Amino acid sequence: MAGLRSRNISVSEASRPVLPRHARLKFDETRQVWVILAPERVLAPDEIAVEVLQLCDGVRSVEAMIDQLAAKYSDPGDGLAVLEQRGSTAETFGIPLAVLAELTHRCPLQCPYCSNPVELERGGSELTTEEWKKVLTELAQIGVLQIHFSGGEPTARKDLVELVQHASDVGLYSNLITSAVLLTREKLSALADAGLCHVQISFQGNEPVVADRVAGFKHAHQKKIEVARWTRELDLPLTVNAVMHRQNLFQLPDIIQMAVDLDADRLEVANVQYYGWALKNRAALMPTLEQIEEASRIVEEAQARLKGILAIDYVVPDYYALRPKKCMGGWGRQFFNISPAGKILPCHAAETITGLEFLSVRSNHSIAWIWQNSEAFNRYRGTGWMPEPCRSCEFKEIDFGGCRCQAFALTGNAGNTDPACTLSPRHEQIFKQAESEAAANNNRLIYRNFSGGTLETGGDYGA
């Protein structure tokens, strides 16, 4: 595409390489390995790669780097020894690499697919500034590398800059997941100065008519575009998070182009996953199979065309999948989130599963103890809990049984096979249900709010 800036790399001996703006090279004291921190990714380079990356400071030329490395590894056996010691440590970390901090459930938007629970936490139950700072310190001490500040809308918290600064002080890579509508340029600049590493802005469409209606907030889209531009002006890396469903999938090509025009590093094309608020709105949001097939084609073509310009991640709806996704990397394996009131959860929807008690950071137990020992985390950890057909499935160490929250929502038992899997006796039923709801074309939304939801009446965004 003419006129697009490219992130394809051309290197000569005179080049002076430097890590991209979104990446950080860090020595992980807990695991005693070097890692690269990037938006929603942790990479474990081998020893030779670390040697090279440490020299990528924007000052040394490639020629100088080669000379320095050649001097260090003058004995051919040295390089071989390093190569023989190589091995990915990323898969053996065993403790969470990243944590989602839901600072609040307060949000000016009313998105009908919000990942927050239907029963939202009131502001009075939220952790205080000092409690959150204590949590951030403890997370860094047990080896967490990334903190994702989310909500609700995290910028509704007046102490957000202070929390980002504290995350930076204790060595956490911070990511802001935001609707952007409450941000000013001054506030965003203050967050950047405090050490914010990455900004992820959610978009509901590529133009105001669809986007503002879905968000339930007038002029939201215009403000998001403005904040996205401020983000890049401040040299912060930007991810566009496009949540897709039946009522906006026709805009996908334009959303991809919008992400390019905004100079985003990444685009997440995330089809709605049907838990919580999205489950209440499933009939209004479920795409047709034809829409998903066309979206997959569009994304595949864009990934090839925009390689080196825009990284595109793509998530299909579970209802049209053949096998379940490895939800959150597997229950209690490599991720948890903390609710506004301090409950430690294997995923944002875990509280929908009745009969599980999730402990809080306000309890007498440390975060590390809760992660390692709590009954709720261990209930569906690993593969020992699995019934048939999961227990004998060749993919059980790959998808870890899929999503427990979805199994509970659709079958009433979180221990059942995820119906997204073709081996589930319920799979064909949910596939047909998806097709039926998509064809019915019921487009009225139930807007997210603290009163349990408000049915769209037309023009007032449920207010």
Image (tube, helix red, strand yellow):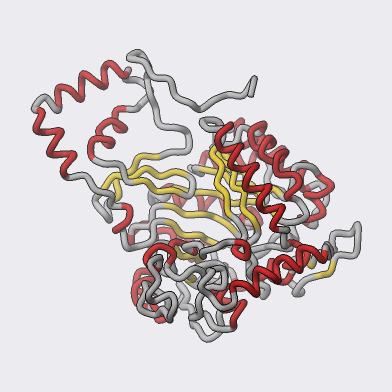
In this rendering, position of residue 431 left or right of residue 284: left
The answer to which image quadrant residue 134 occupies is bottom left
Residue 193: x percent and y percent?
Answer: 52, 39
Q: Is residue 231 visible?
A: yes
In the rendered view, tell whether residue 244 sits above or below residue 9.
Answer: below
In this rendering, position of residue 307 left or right of residue 81: right
Quadrant in which the N terminus appears: top right
- Residue found at x 52% / y 49%: 175
Residue 441: x percent and y percent?
Answer: 83, 63
Near-viewer residue (207 or 246): 246
Quadrant in which the C terminus appears: bottom right
- Residue found at x 56% / y 78%: 425
Give the total of numbered labels.
Answer: 0
The answer to which image quadrant residue 61 occupies is top left
Near-viewer residue (137 or 32): 32
- Residue found at x 26% / y 54%: 31
Residue 228: x percent and y percent?
Answer: 66, 38
Near-viewer residue (307 or 98): 307
